[in-house]
Amino acid sequence: MTPDTRTFHIQTFGCQMNAADSEWLSRSLEGLGFREAPFEEAAFHILNTCSVRDKPEQKVYSELGRIARHCKVNKIDGVTVCVGGCVAQQAGPALAKRFPQVRLVFGTDGIARAPEAISRLAEEKRLRLSLLDFAEDYVERADPRLESGRRVPAPPSVFVNIMQGCDNYCAYCIVPYVRGGQKSRRAQAVVDECRTLVEAGSREITLLGQNVNAYGQDKGADGASFASLLHNVAAIPGLERLRFVTSHPKDIAPEVVAAFAGLPALCPRLHLPLQSGSDKILRAMNRRYDTARYRAIVKALRAARPDIVLTTDVIVGFPGESEDDFTATMDIMEEVGFASAFSFVYSDRPRARATLLPDKVDRALAFERLSRLQEKQNQASERVLAAMVGSDSVILVESRSRMAAPPAPEASEPDARAPQPTGDGCFWQGKTPQGFIVNVRLDGAPDAGRPARDGLCDAWLGAMVPVRIEEAAKHSLKGRQAGAPW
Ligand code: SAH
Ligand code: SF4
Ligand code: F3S
């Protein structure tokens, strides 16, 4: 069997930048006449990969094996695999040598030319291509969602890239090697993209970069600072909410802290990776801030915006981490009270300097520390959510809820995971400005003069809905509508 040559299936690993890249790639391929298809039916399998830790990297190799086996067992010919993102940049053409189905490898700058390359591969069956060069400046990409005269409404919440790469060389990190040096996008291009998206119906924008606080500080930049970019994007008429990710504590400027007080659209939630609570370990990590500076930033942020919610990343078991260093991490986490934390056991990465450090922490001990930390953080996260019960907020409705509604009397076979329309109501999901997920049943249709969407239920997509929080679950909240939507 040979699948339809203009079908593709994308799998995405890693960070939000990869997720945004995959969405762009998918839109662009559709613009070239390709169609997204289920795993079993696709002629092109695209893997957008992450190499930040060993685990996501190994997943890519096992996925390449799975695709090869799937084709062999089911006697499927003509399947091509395209590997993009950070593992592609790191392993390069070696991937194509090891896995004959791989006919395209593209890096994080090369992705701009990937749609055109995939089109060529569909025509020329023996062709193999590699797009791994780093560009000097930020590479702008043609984006079908920005074309004038487009009819499809933009999603309520969207990501907009403001930079590529990173110059920080944290001792554990592979990112500067696989995504190249920092390259800021021109401020005008960012603002234009944001304005077009808002005009097409988006109400929330998240600005993306590996270290957004250093935006504008590289040589190709056009002089705009991150704070000024925030002001210019926040001023776009119709934009309700603005967020950004990720922030490096060493680069957060006082003007950015002040923006949390001065810009109502800027949401009171900030992801501020701590990595460790020990100054000795932070130094060894080359993070270039200490815990005193971290605490001072937290204090300033809370003074600017008392309801701000903080989240973080932590690495445990970095080389040389003693029990005391680990305890210091637990202590500062408790003191700050993060709403959530991504925590990882340190993993050696090719070319990262920490790979050469002595005093590697025993793996079993590191995993034991990780589970202690996660257990404590889970309790803290649950406390933060529980404290929201009884409060009022506003959600931006982003999707149907997976949560089951109470079965309607006439419903005979309720599917526990699918949203259950009851009467003319549906369960929906949206986020508060603080980024908490709220499930809420919404009946009828909002009557405000919002752009019409298909069907009664879809009418709620993109609505701002006042809610009263009634219950807290482990990772989300449940509420009821408490006012007129807009
Ligand atoms: N640019 C972002 C994060 C990039 S990677 C930032 O600086 O915050 C996301 C997270 O993965 C990092 O914050 C770190 O906590 C974790 N990480 C990166 N390299 C790692 C490694 N070698 N081992 C374990 N965790 C790692
Ligand atoms: Fe990696 Fe550090 Fe750059 Fe983040 S700031 S991507 S952790 S080198
Ligand atoms: Fe992973 Fe690359 Fe993002 S290594 S975290 S996908 S920058």
Image (cartoon, rainbow, N blue to C red):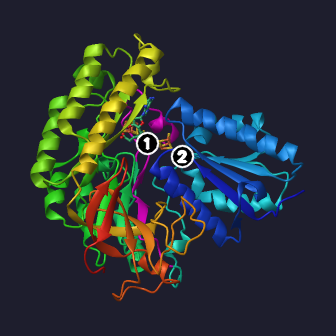
* Picture quadrant of residue 480: bottom left
* Picture quadrant of residue 2: bottom right
Q: Return the residue found at the far front.
A: 409
Position of 465 with respect to 158 (left or right) is left
Mark found first going from the N terminus, 2 or 1: 2
Instruction: Write down the residue under mark 2.
Output: 134
For ligand 1, the image quadrant comes to top left
Q: Is residue 171 above or below residue 231?
A: above
The quadrant of the image that shows the N terminus is bottom right
Q: Which residue is pictured at 82% across the width and 64% down the height?
A: 4
- Cβ–Cβ under 8 Å for marks 2 and 1: yes
Q: Which residues are magenta?
A: 153-182
The answer, for residue 278, to whether it is visible in the render is no
**SS at badge 2:** loop
Instruction: Write down the residue under mark 1.
Output: 181
Which amino acid lies under the numbered mark 2 shown in the image of this protein?
Phe
Which amino acid lies under the numbered mark 1 shown in the image of this protein?
Gly
Q: Which residue is pictured at 36% across the width and 47% down the height?
A: 474
Q: Which residue is pictured at 31% across the width and 35% down the height?
A: 377
**SS at badge 1:** loop
Between the C-alphas of marks 2 and 1, the distance is 9 Å
Q: Is residue 232 magenta?
A: no
